[in-house]
Image (spheres, rainbow, N blue to C red):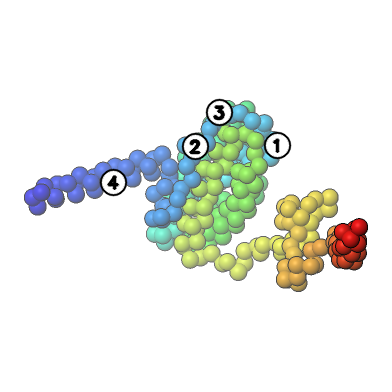
């Protein structure tokens, strides 16, 4: 193959990659932000037929996703107007545009499942927007990052709960897509270097005992102490130890009787052979 042919071949490959990347970005908004080697959830494998019971938690989740877009879209627009930092402007633009896509998803899901969605932010969210509207420059930047990072930190575990527990396939797919968006937004917000991680809520301590009426394999589960893990005998209950002891005693008695009776049997056989 000539050098000219090789050049044209590589150009065609690059164009193909660029077109594929652009198409993937339209279909999967978070795909363009994925790191090499990091797998993306195969959303096309999840059905979206609306089948399955819709629980109250599912309805509440859809409402929360809708509310997130109702205040984060205008917040992102304000970031482009009131911030002097190009990085904050870009973060606000990206988060707002991605929430437009997510908002369309939740509205389509709500229509399919007959879920009523709000049309305005709630009182807390409106308060955050008012706070941003009264700030600019670096003050705005800090408020914007603080409020959005806190909000995403709260909804992130809620998404995981719905994704793993819902019986409805439309809600399941919405939760999976929302999880991808929120993870991307968390990363964008933290890239600002303005997040005060020390001020974030801490995780609750691990559970050390099984919940009342539940098994050790339940939520959290019973955690074995280091002594329990290192001592195999500690996992044996008293009844089990008693059964083992009785079994050993029985085996010992049986063997002793056999050993005692075998010489007598051999003697009898000798005596019988003489007659």
Q: Secondary structure at mark 2?
A: helix
Earlier sequence position, callout 1 versus callout 2: 2
Q: Verify CB contact (< 8 Å) between mark 2 and mark 3.
A: no
- Of residues 269 and 91, which is closer to you in this image? 269
Earlier sequence position, callout 4 versus callout 3: 4
Q: Is residue 241 above or below residue 10?
A: below
| Label placed on residue 49 | 3
Query: Going by the image, does 45 lie left or right of 151?
Result: left
Disc 1 residue crowd, few under 14, some 14–19, many 20+, Cα 10 Å: few
Q: Quadrant of the C terminus?
A: bottom right
Q: Is residue 11 above or below residue 265?
A: above
Q: Is residue 32 visible?
A: yes
Q: Secondary structure at mark 1?
A: helix
The residue labelled by disc 2 is 45
Earlier sequence position, callout 4 versus callout 1: 4
Alpha-carbon distance for marks 4 and 2?
24 Å
The residue labelled by disc 4 is 17
Q: Verify CB contact (< 8 Å) between mark 4 and mark 3.
A: no
Residue depicted at 64% across the width and 30% down the height:
52
The residue labelled by disc 1 is 56
Q: Position of residue 238 (x, y in %)?
A: 88, 62
Alpha-carbon distance for marks 4 and 3?
32 Å
Alpha-carbon distance for marks 4 and 1?
44 Å
């Amino acid at each position: 193959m000539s050098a000219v042919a090789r050049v044209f071949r590589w150009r065609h490959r690059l164009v193909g990659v660029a077109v594929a990347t652009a198409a993937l970005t339209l279909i999967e908004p978070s795909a363009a932000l994925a790191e090499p080697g990091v797998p993306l959830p195969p959303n096309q494998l999840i059905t979206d037929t609306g089948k399955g019971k819709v629980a109250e938690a599912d309805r509440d989740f859809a409402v929360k996703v809708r509310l997130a877009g109702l205040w984060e879209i205008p917040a992102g627009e304000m970031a482009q107007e009131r911030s002097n930092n190009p990085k904050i402007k870009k973060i606000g633009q990206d988060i707002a545009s991605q929430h437009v896509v997510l908002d369309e998803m939740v509205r389509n899901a709500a229509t399919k499942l007959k879920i009523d969605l709000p049309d305005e932010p709630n009182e807390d969210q409106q308060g955050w927007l008012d706070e941003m509207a009264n700030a600019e420059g670096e003050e705005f930047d800090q408020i914007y990052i603080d409020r959005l990072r806190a909000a995403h930190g709260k909804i992130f575990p809620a998404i995981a709960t719905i994704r793993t527990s819902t019986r409805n396939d439309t809600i399941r797919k919405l939760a999976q897509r929302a999880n991808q968006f929120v993870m991307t937004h968390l990363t964008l917000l933290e890239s600002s270097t303005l997040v005060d991680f020390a001020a974030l809520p801490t995780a609750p301590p691990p559970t050390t005992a099984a919940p009342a009426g539940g098994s050790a394999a339940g939520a959290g589960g019973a955690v074995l102490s280091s002594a329990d893990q290192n001592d195999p005998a500690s996992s044996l209950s008293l009844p089990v130890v008693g059964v083992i002891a009785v079994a050993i005693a029985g085996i010992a008695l049986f063997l002793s009787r056999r050993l005692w009776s075998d010489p007598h049997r051999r003697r009898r056989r000798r005596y019988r052979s003489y007659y």
